[in-house]
Structures are given as C-alpha cells and as structure tokens.
Image (cartoon, rainbow, N blue to C red):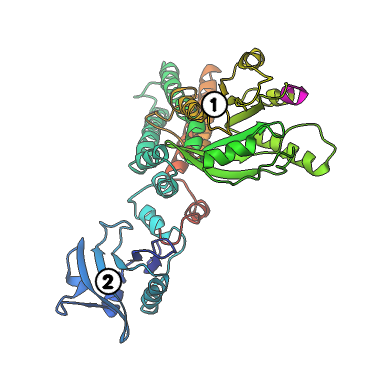
C-alpha cells in the first residue's frame, strides 16, 4: 500500500451548507495539527480519542480560512484502515479549495480517483466486489438499486463467492492429498461423489448468472424506447411523462429526426426514455437515418412502448414495427382515443399478444394505467427485483461464467474417465476465476481500472 498521506474534497463540487475535506495516512494527525487551532489550545489532536469531534479554525499560517469541525478516526478502525481526519467546513467552493490547498502544502498529496476506497480494499477492510458496491451505492437511481448496493456492500455477493471457493478448494485439497498418498486415501468412487458436488455448484452459479439481466436493469435503469409511425404521439408521450416540453411537437409528420434520451423516475423504477423518429418509408435521407437509428434503439431496448395512432388505419409501417417487437418486452399504446377511432383494441389484439392500453396523451387519459402496467411487468411479471441476491456487475458475471465453464470441464473429464489429476487443473481455474471477483486474484491493472472510475474524494 502507498504510505503517502492523501487528501481530497469528498463532497460534490457545488455550493452547499457544508463541505468535507478528507485526509488519510500516517501523517494525517500531524498535518492537521499544523493548520488547526482548537478553541481549547491545550488540546493536542494526536492525543485525542478516535471517533471524537473537535471545534476550531483552519489557518494558512496566520490567515484564518474558516471555522470548522474535525472528525478524528484512528486506524485501523476507519474507512481506509489508516489514521483519518475529516474537516467539516462551510460549503463554498472557494473555501473548500483553499483548505485543501493548505492541507497539501503541509505534507499531503492530492488523492487519485477512488484512492480512499482503494486503501480500504488494500487494507483488507473490504474486498473488490464490496468496493464496486460503493460506486453502485453512490450512483443508485432508485430504491431497488440502493437496496441491492447496500446488500452487496454488506457482503452478500462476496459471501456467496467465498462459499463457492471453499467447496472447490476442499475438493482440490482432497484430490491432491489422495494423489500424494494413495496408500492411505482412496479415490474409489470419488468421481461420482465429485460429480454430485459439481452439479450443485453449477446449478447455484447458473442461478446467480440468471439474475444478471435483472441486475443490469436495476443498476442502469430500464432502456425504454418509444416507437411508432410519424405523428402517432411519441414525442407528446415523452413530454407528458417527463412533465415538461422536452421534445418538439408539431402536426408535421417526421418532426423528430434523431433519438432524444431522457431520464424518468417512476415509482421506484428508473426509465431511460428514448424518443425516436417515426418509422415509415421515406425518400428523405436525413429521415432515413433517423428511422435506422430508431430500429437500432428498438433492438437494444429492455422495453418498447409502441404508440399507435388510433385515428388512422394500420398499414405496412405498423406491420414493420410489430416485427421489431418480436422477442421484446413491449406495451402497445392505442393513442388519440379523444378522436374518432379507425383502429380498435380488438384489431391490435388480433395481431399481437402484447398488452394494449387505450389512451389519449392529449387528454392525459390512460397514463396511470400505463404506469401500473410497467410496474406490474418489472416488479411482478417477467422481471423481478425481489431476489435475495442479484448480480449487477459485468465483471462479476464474466468471472462466474468462467468458473462455470471450468467446472463443466471437470464434469466432462469425469464422464470420459480421465485421470483424477486432470480434475485439479480445471478446479483451480474455477477457483481463480471466482477469486477475480473478490480481488484476490486481481492484478494491479484491474485494480487501477476499477478505482479510476470513482470520484476523487471517495
């Protein structure tokens, strides 16, 4: 571990009521003693107990910078496992920067992105999966994502991975012992017993892998693409859902030429909304590009809201859109119910099994039913965020897939009657792949890449 003392502003870089400058390292207390003057001058900071708060002022030599509160945490019982001081000052950007500059002038260096959490990892307080959960917690956009991040930070994923590794290590150690001492340890019938252990492990790993799509949606939000013909009411729907005029709406067909992306929080669900160009045959080159991008967005979507103009008859463009819906989660919105309808709910149901909602975006009718349908789909339907354990990180998914692959190779070796010493190679490959998730087998490059995504003060 780098033994430099580091410092950074840990609050957001915007004005606020308070700002926090964090200092961590073996010189943290000696640095603060050079710049902090307590209201009780007899108090020496390094002599004070851990988890105590002290009131005073920060000075740059003889220049008063701010009245502050100090929070002291002595290692190893701190976030970084090192001596740590947090300066709570007033939240103006200028005063925070001046205090940080003073800390740096007196012996600290500026922390790299994620370096505080990296030190917690290197100090053994958390593993790599828990460190990544810290970032997920900071970026959580809804209650479900928050709860999942907290669960992983507490070690829910880590404990499951450790359990897998413990079982694999036990079998590997038994094999190695038996191969080294065949006179006292028999491998008769061991292949059948190991196969049962592997079947159980593979089933558990597969079950965990199956939660990844849900976990990705939970973490990143539901990629929701609004499709339809020109003038169906797609942009109007986006504006109504957002509660503001974000998309240009006119009576001219083809107004929307490119993809417009917006964020929406819907009763605990985070929707990444994509308003797209109307899908139709056109000679306009720019509009053709827009239609192409709309189809690309549909392919990458988690949910499609297909807006049908109920005042116009269905045509070949609607047939093309219905084809885009195949193998996707979708809701059909029969719009413009305030007008004379040329398309009925029954007509739509004859063409597709997707749920159909009759609405009028203009009058605000049917929107509540749409919200409820999305909630039903993602909380009670095909997707559920209620699993005890959900994988949300692509790196964890890759590690589990590699481990599963190695364990299946052991199974194949057993079925083919291969020598037992070959089992240990694939067993240890699985053990290593799982260790990558925890950071026990991770190289410096991977560690740097992960922590480089953090903000500087964390």
Return the residue nearer the eye: 11 or 71: 11
Image: 438 above or below 88: above
Categorize mark 2 by other alpha carbons within 10 Å: few (<14), some (14-19), many (20+): many
For the residues marked 1 and 2, what is the alpha-carbon distance in whole angstroms? 61 Å
Categorize mark 1 by other alpha carbons within 10 Å: few (<14), some (14-19), many (20+): some
Query: Residue 409 bears which disc, if any?
Result: 1
Residue position marked by numbered label 2 in the rendering: 68
Return the residue nearer the eye: 303 or 355: 355
- Residue 249 is a magenta residue: no
Return the residue nearer the eye: 116 or 411: 116
Image: 328 above or below 149: above
The picture places residue 11, in percent across and down from the top left corner, at 39, 61
Q: Residue furthest right?
A: 283
Image: 48 above or below 173: below
The picture places residue 157, in percent across and down from the top left corner, at 39, 37
Q: Secondary structure at mark 2?
A: strand
Mark closer to the observer (1, 2): 2
Q: Which residues are magenta?
A: 314-319
20 horizontally vs 111: left or right: left
Return the residue nearer the eye: 94 or 423: 94
- Magenta region, main secondary structure: helix
Residue 100 seen anywhere in this rendered image of the structure: yes
């Amino acid at each position: 571990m780098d033994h430099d003392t580091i410092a950074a502003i840990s609050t957001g870089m915007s004005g606020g009521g308070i700002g926090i400058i964090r200092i961590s390292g073996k010189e943290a207390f000696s640095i603060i003693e050079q710049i902090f003057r307590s209201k009780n001058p007899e108090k020496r900071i390094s002599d004070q107990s851990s988890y105590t708060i002290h009131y005073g002022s920060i000075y740059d030599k003889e220049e008063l910078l701010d009245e502050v509160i100090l929070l002291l945490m002595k290692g190893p019982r701190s976030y970084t496992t090192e001596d740590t001081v947090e300066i709570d000052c007033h939240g103006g950007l200028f005063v925070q920067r001046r205090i940080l500059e003073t800390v740096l002038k007196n012996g600290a260096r500026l922390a790299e992105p994620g370096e505080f959490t990296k030190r917690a990892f290197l100090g053994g307080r958390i593993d790599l999966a828990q460190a990544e959960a810290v970032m997920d917690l900071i970026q959580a956009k809804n209650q479900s994502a928050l709860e999942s991040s907290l669960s992983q930070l507490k070690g829910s994923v880590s404990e499951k991975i450790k359990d897998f590794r413990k079982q694999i290590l036990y079998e590997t150690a038994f094999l190695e012992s038996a191969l080294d001492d065949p006179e006292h340890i028999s491998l008769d019938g061991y292949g059948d017993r190991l196969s049962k252990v592997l079947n159980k492990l593979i089933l558990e790993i597969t079950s965990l892998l199956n939660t990844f799509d849900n976990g990705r949606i939970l973490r990143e939000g539901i990629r929701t693409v609004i499709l339809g013909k020109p003038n169906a009411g797609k942009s109007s729907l986006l504006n109504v859902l957002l509660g503001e005029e974000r998309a240009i709406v006119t009576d001219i067909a083809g107004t929307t030429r490119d993809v417009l992306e917006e964020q929406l929080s819907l009763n605990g669900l985070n929707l990444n909304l994509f308003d797209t160009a109307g899908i139709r045959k056109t000679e306009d080159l720019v509009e053709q590009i827009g239609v192409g991008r709309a189809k690309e967005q549909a392919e990458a979507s988690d949910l499609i809201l297909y807006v049908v103009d109920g005042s116009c008859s269905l045509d070949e463009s609607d047939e093309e859109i219905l084809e885009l819906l195949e193998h996707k989660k979708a809701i059909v919105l029969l719009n413009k119910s305030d007008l004379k309808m040329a398309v009925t709910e029954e007509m739509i149901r004859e063409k597709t099994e997707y749920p159909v909602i009759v609405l009028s975006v203009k009058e605000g009718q049917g929107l509540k039913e749409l919200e409820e349908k999305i909630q039903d789909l993602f909380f009670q339907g095909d997707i559920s965020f209620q699993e005890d354990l959900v994988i949300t990180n692509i790196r964890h998914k890759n590690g589990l897939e590699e481990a599963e692959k190695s364990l299946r190779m052991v199974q194949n070796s057993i079925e083919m009657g291969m020598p037992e010493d070959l089992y240990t190679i694939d067993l240890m490959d699985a053990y290593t792949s799982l260790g990558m998730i925890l950071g026990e087998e991770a190289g410096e490059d991977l560690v740097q890449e992960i922590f480089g995504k953090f903000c500087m003060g964390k």
